[in-house]
Amino acid sequence: MIERLADPAEARAWCAERRESGASVGFVPTMGALHIGHLSLVERAVAENDFACVSVFVNPLQFDDPSDLECYPRDFEGDARLLEGVGCAMVFTGTLEQFFPGELSADGALASARLVDPGPAAEGLEGACRSGHFGGVATIVERLFEVVEPERAYFGRKDYQQALVIADLARRRGGPRGIVCDIVRESSGLACSSRNALLTDGERERAVCLSRSLETVDAAWREGARDAALLGALLRENLERVGVEVEYAELRDPERWSAAAPLGELERAVALVAARVGGVRLIDNRVLGVGGDGRG
Ligand code: PAF
């Protein structure tokens, strides 16, 4: 039976007890509305640790758009049942006040000076489109790490830039070991995301253009295309043709993050896209030339 805890202080005690008895704790931080992508992370955490635990917290610090925060799907009980089915030992949630006791102002906000610096990987793309987003992510993830003190923490590669920000954070604080797992896709190629639940049937069909545009650029790469501008233009064209609202469609060097797209001939590349389909903002990415299974 999964342990359901509604207070991070209880979660901290639960994790400490396990660690003190010599057990390893694997951790998957989430914002809930769990799908098979999350569950694949949890399955791995279960397999590689004595205990796996999951946080479910829709973190207001990382939303720059109040209506996005409002609409974000929430179903704690449904999430707990799914987690129990894959062998997760504990799931916890909390309020912003419980995560930062005594630190919120009268209007319930956390002072901006208290936000954790997300570092250079936060520059450009998601960081440029979503003001303050990665500061909010780094702040809650640091707090979640303090609560759980896991041996290993698991993240999906769909949030490519987030995984870089969190890897930097884990390095700065000396742990946990961050494990970045492959993107899980629906049979259409659409990357699994909690936001997919907000798509209408028609939007879901159009949303497939994100993964298709990445496949097209991957095919061009395999045929020898290396020019950054040309590959970026190909990516964008394939999205715009379907009529989705492109926020970015760019390449980066996967071994050296840069705020701006690199210029000229590339030796390595990851293609990253963000687009609004109807009112729903989706992201996806692919490391070019790496594998035909949606890895990226
Ligand atoms: O990827 C997410 O779901 C969130 O950004 C995270 C890492 C749980 C922090 O709120």
Image (tube, grey):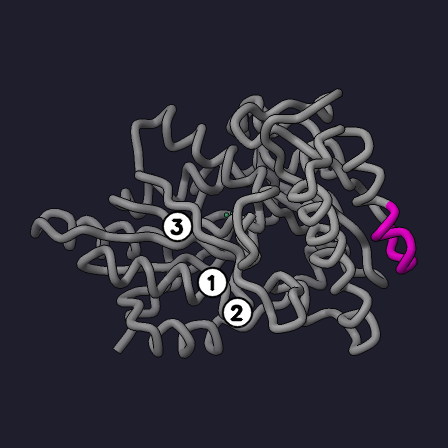
Picture disc at residue 35: 2
Q: How far across and how far down the image is residue 205, in percent?
A: 79, 72
Q: Which residue is mark 1?
A: 38
Query: Could you tell me how far apart the alpha carbons at marks 3 and 1 are, in whole angstroms?
Result: 9 Å
Residue 121 in the image: above or below residue 208:
above
Residue farthest left in this picture: 21
Which of the two residues, 288 or 137, is positioned nearer the viewer here?
288
Magenta segment boundaries in residue numbering: 237-245
- Element under label 2? loop
Q: How far across and how far down the image is residue 243, in percent?
A: 92, 58
Q: How far across and how far down the image is residue 258, in percent?
A: 64, 23
Query: Could you tell me how far apart the alpha carbons at marks 3 and 2 are, in whole angstroms?
Result: 15 Å
The residue lying at 33 percent from left, 60 percent from top is 44
Confirm or reject: label 2 Cβ below 8 Å from ligand 1: no
**Residue 272 in sight:** yes
Name the amino acid type tagged 2.
Answer: His
Q: Residues within 10 Å of mark 1 (few under 14, many from 20)?
A: many
Name the amino acid type tagged 3.
Answer: Tyr
Tag 3 and tag 2, C-beta contact below 8 Å: no
